[in-house]
Amino acid sequence: MENEEELQAKANRYEIDANIVLANLHKIKPYDTKLKALDFEGKEVEIVLPKGVKIHRVSDYLFKKARRLRQKFENLHIERDSLKEKIAFYERLKQTIEESNSCSEIEMLVPKRGRSSAKKEKSEFETFWIEDFKIFVGRNSTENQKLLKVAKANDIWMHIKDMPSAHCIIKTNKQQIPQRVLEQAAKLCVDFSVTYAGDYLVDYTQRKNVTPKEGSNVLYVKYNTIAVKK
């Protein structure tokens, strides 16, 4: 990832150059490729003029470059946090695979290639299959919010009770979900949310009973609870 200090320094440089160009616009000839002038501290500077940009538009061009870099700088920490959360997710996946007691548990975590390739679809969420029911798991807060938006009213939503956790969605396709599938999905929810052994409670309800609040926080009603031991 790019360095915040370097991005900010580049943005500052573009902004200063834009102001110098604006102050010396009357000196620049249409054929000039560079501008030699004094900056606002009295030091001589040389600014390379962008090719293909009309002289009277150069300052606007440089201001726009500065604004884009500042926007990138402001969003960089969001991207970094998202990547860190995804790394943590895959570390938990690795831990869960290592702790699996059977091949069937691992197959659930790493779907068979034939099944996934037959679908020929890409998902922005981590996807698992339990007895032909598709399970989506959010790898970070952004994905948790997106899951709530794309889930259908009758899909099943899961979350660990009273603590931050991954959001899980079971695609129902208007079918009744067997209890064993709910229990395995609840285990996925725990496995990809916490690293410590213990007893956890996972609440689940239909997506239509979940009301998104700020960020990935929610309020939900008409729910049931499954106990999971990690």
Image: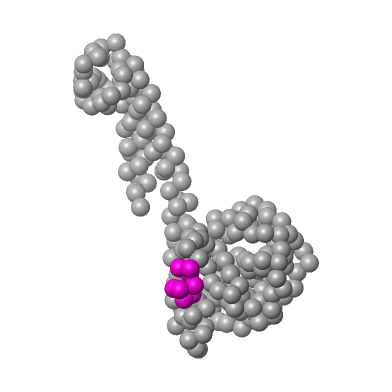
Residue at image x 75%, y 61%? 209
Main SS class of the magenta portion in the image: helix
Kindly tell me whether residue 93 is visible in this rendering: no
* Image location of residue 129, percent across then percent down: 55, 74
Q: Nearer the viewer, residue 105 or 190?
A: 105
Query: Does residue 158 belong to the magenta stretch?
Result: no
Residue at image x 47%, y 57%? 82
Image height of 7 relative to 226, above or below:
above
Residue 173: quarter of image: bottom right
Q: Nearer the viewer, residue 31 or 88?
A: 31
Residue at image x 50%, y 59%? 124
* Image location of residue 205, percent across then percent down: 72, 67
Residue 5: quarter of image: top left
The quarter of the picture where the C terminus appears is: bottom right
Q: Which residues are magenta?
A: 111-118
Here the colouring is one colour
Residue at image x 78%, y 67%? 222
Query: Does residue 115 belong to the magenta stretch?
Result: yes
Q: What number of labels is visible? A: 0
